[in-house]
Image: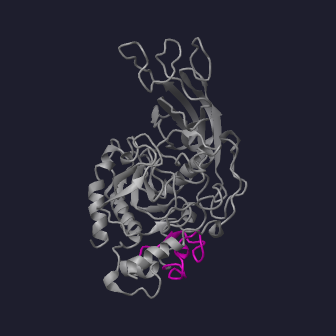
Amino acid sequence: MSRIGSMRGFLASSVGVTCAAALALPLALPASPAQAGPSTAASEAAAPGSTQSLPLVPLTRERSLRPTARTQGLARRNVRPFSLVGVVWDDPASELNGRVQVRTREAGTGVWSDWQEVEAHNDEHAPDPDTDEGSSRRAHGSTAPLWVGNSDGVEVRVEAERTARDATGDLEEGAGDGSGDGSEAPLPDGLRLELVDPGGDPPGPDARTAGRAGGAPSGLRARSLHAAVPDGKGGAGVTELPALSREETERTYFPEGMTDRRAAPYIGPRPGIVTRRGWGANENLRERGFRYTKKVKAAFVHHTASGNKYSCSQVPSIIRSIYRYHVVSSGWRDIGYNFLVDKCGNIYEGRAGGVAKAVMGAHTRGFNTNSMGIAVIGSFGATKPTDAALKAISRLTAWKLGLYGADPRGRTYLKSAGGNLYRKGKNVRLNVISGHRDGFATECPGRLLYGKLGSARTTAARYQGR
């Protein structure tokens, strides 16, 4: 058998491994966001955070004060400290067709921010509809999260968009059931403001430098890729997987005895990766066990739409906040993305299950099977991504796609699980490195990041030696 054939068999053999490799058995998730409070069983590596869930109320006295009134929100109020905001609602199948804006007060200064936009449509970042995660009763509709920094006051308003009528006077398709004269689409039921406190940073070495001097964790070349990640044997307690050379990468991820250099696959050197322990994941929040797919055929690039006003030292807090928002507020089993990248070029492990394994995420609705999701922290509709972030995307995809024999410059087929671009069951031809908008009608990953994916494909292929 060729070396690449052996590698594929080797990868496939580890797919069935599930919760035996978990760091800790998680507690059950809260029944609803309103019941979520400070964690009482934080993992050893993470300080507890909390979620405040505040029901929104009608802000205008119109004929109807139903929950679907046109404008809902909260007047200025004092709240417990938080750093990230979002809005959720009861039914994940319902869309929030409207505008969401927040103002926050900086803790310690009393200064209120200007109104900031929250990206209203987040259903494209979601589990696939027919999976246990996507159909869970815990799942909720949600906006994108917005990072606002340490705050202790908030004001929010959610305004339904006005719908147009066609020439016959009927509502245009997709406009919804308006109130009054039918010119206003209703807001979804159960709107709530989620205020997330990420908790303190984990104790120990700095997450971005820990582990670099110590070399690869012991046992990496043993019989399973599970040894190469902090979720499994030999890696527990590691805060960062160090960068490896191409030769070290091949020795690490290929079983001993596979020495035929003529059959060597195209694989990029592994970049350094901050583990979940490194950014302080509270493993008691997520569901126990993992979900795997057969392989990684494509990578979808996203932006978090959480804003660009952050320093790289704040990134572990931002990721803990997004993690808590995805699990506690949106009702997902874990953070949706497989990896996250910051503007300084640091790479972070996302959804648990093993950085080298084909972990099913909740990043591209309809195409979470046989793919991975990489989220660049920030918003890139009007802001250019940094060169460091683009380099990190290239290095990460060169390595991870190389493990599964994928050419970053190539195209592949993925079967749609259903979405707003492709019907369920359709085989769709996509770039091996695609933007989120290629699989779902969305602005993600932002116009200026999407425009850089061509150069990322070329650079990733060069890292693979192609």
Which residue is at the front of the view, 248 or 332? 332
Q: Is residue 371 visible?
A: yes
Query: Does residue 253 lie above or below 433 as drawn?
Result: below
Which residue is at the front of the view, 241 or 25? 25
Q: Quadrant of the N terminus?
A: bottom left
Q: Relative to 209, is 390 on the left or the right?
A: left
Image quadrant of residue 78? top right
Query: Does residue 316 lie above or below 122 as drawn?
Result: below
Q: Magenta region: which residues? A: 215-244
Q: Position of residue 196 (x, y in %)?
A: 59, 44
Query: Does residue 424 lie above or below 348 as drawn?
Result: above
Q: Give the main secondary structure of the magenta stretch.
A: loop
Q: Position of residue 417 (x, y in %)?
A: 48, 48
Q: Relative to 227, is 466 on the left or the right?
A: left
Q: Quadrant of the C terminus?
A: bottom left
Image quadrant of residue 170? top left
Q: How is the image coloured?
A: one colour
Q: How many marks?
A: 0
Image quadrant of residue 105? top right
Query: Does residue 9 lie above or below 132 as drawn?
Result: below
Q: Is 452 covered by the magenta stretch?
A: no
Q: Residue at x 26, y 62 (%)?
A: 458
Q: Residue at x 51, y 79 (%)?
A: 220
Q: Is residue 245 visible?
A: no
Q: Relative to 462, is 188 on the left or the right?
A: right
Q: Position of residue 362 (x, y in %)?
A: 51, 51
Which residue is at the front of the view, 319 or 405? 405
Q: Is 236 covered by the magenta stretch?
A: yes
